[in-house]
Image (spheres, rainbow, N blue to C red):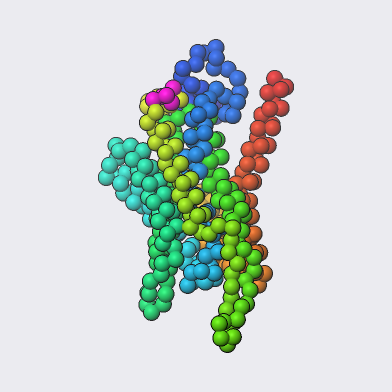
Amino acid sequence: MFQSCNGSVRLKSDDDKEFSPCLSKKERTGPRMWSAQRRVTLDVLMACWGLGTWLGVNGLYVQLPLLVERLPEGWALPSSMVLAIQLANVGILVYALLKRLLPRASDAPFIYGLLAVGTLALVLNAFLYERTSMVGGTERSVAYLSLTFFAALVGCTSSVLFYPYLRHFRDVYLATYLVGEGLSGFVPSLLALAQGVGGEPECLPSADNSTLYPHYPPARFDSTVFLLLLGCLSATSLVSFILISTLSAFDSERVAPAAAAKDEEATTQRASLLSPRWLGVLVLMAVLNALNNGVLPSIQSYSCMPYGTQAYHLAVTLGAMANPAACLAGLYEFLEVEFLVLSCT
């Protein structure tokens, strides 16, 4: 522990978490974070684990330009999908209740179960997304929306479940996990761009030439293949976490239980969220999340409808790529500054 200039006492846990305990004091020199001593294999596994966080939500979202043409909800499908995703926030309440009932239970089994549910939901959705049921006299995509709910449980719960587990490892691996989390939006968008939407629909006459019906050109591969690819990526995330949590080869990269407990205790000593400053931040976060995750995705199909399916496809996929691309650009700037600092020292 050390005392800061204003007299407050803080835990000095960076040294324990930044450097590997298997290194000697002489070897514990050099830059932090990306240029610190690290296990590349663990970096790869951390990135693959982070890939599974928002993979289901982002992957299903970029499929909307194809699904609105095939499912009975039509252009109103995004609003129903947003509702199913928001309902998946109940996973946070379930996790809080389980931690209340089992306070000493490890987070690893919860993560196993959550990733397994997300993987299974994506695989089942690949074969059941076109199954419909009658609800209140109206045809509805019950199977697709129900499986979307279970796939969204991973993303909605990961922020309160995955991040605390990372305290058991050195801080240097947080960056690679966040890179993987950014790729959970970038990779599905790349797959959607490769898939395409097949072009604009054409009006073709019926067999008796009495009416016209829309014909949608097929994409390069259908939604079943796309969702199976997402299921494979989610399974990769599950396997990666199993290796992270069970392999003894990474024991040297873990933080001692006492240091992790001190770090957890330090994070619990924070200002009250009821203070005016925090209330303002929480209100702004609520408004921004309501717009980005609720209002805008629900109305985007209607705003893009006059411009056709191709425009809607590009708006969805490029929009999903914008956030992780901006984060990776910020990471590049950070690495560039760090390199310049190291070169001058």
Q: Is residue 338 left or right of residue 154?
A: right
Name which residue lies at 40% across and 46% down. Answer: 115
Residue 275 in sight from this viewpoint: no
Above-or-below relation of 176 to 35: below
Measuring from the top left, give residue 63's x and y in whole percent.
54, 59
Residue range highlighted in magenta: 248-252
**Residue at x 47% of width, y 67% of height:** 80
Q: Give the quarter of the image for residue 248.
A: top left
Residue 96 placement (x, y as % from top left): 35, 48
Q: Residue furthest bottom?
A: 210
Q: Residue at x 52, y 62 (%)?
A: 294
Q: Residue furthest front?
A: 207
Q: Is residue 141 visible?
A: yes
Q: Is residue 334 magenta?
A: no
Nearest the eye: 282 or 63: 63
Relative to 140, does residue 265 appear above or below in the rendering? Answer: above
Q: Quadrant of the C terminus?
A: top right
Q: How many marks?
A: 0
Q: Taking 248 as reference, is 190 above or below it?
A: below
- Give me the residue at 58% from left, 51% from top: 191
Q: Position of residue 165 (x, y in %)?
A: 41, 37
Image x and y of residue 2, in percent:
50, 23
Say whether residue 249 is magenta.
yes
SS assignment for the magenta stretch, majority: helix
Name the image quarter holding residue 244: top left
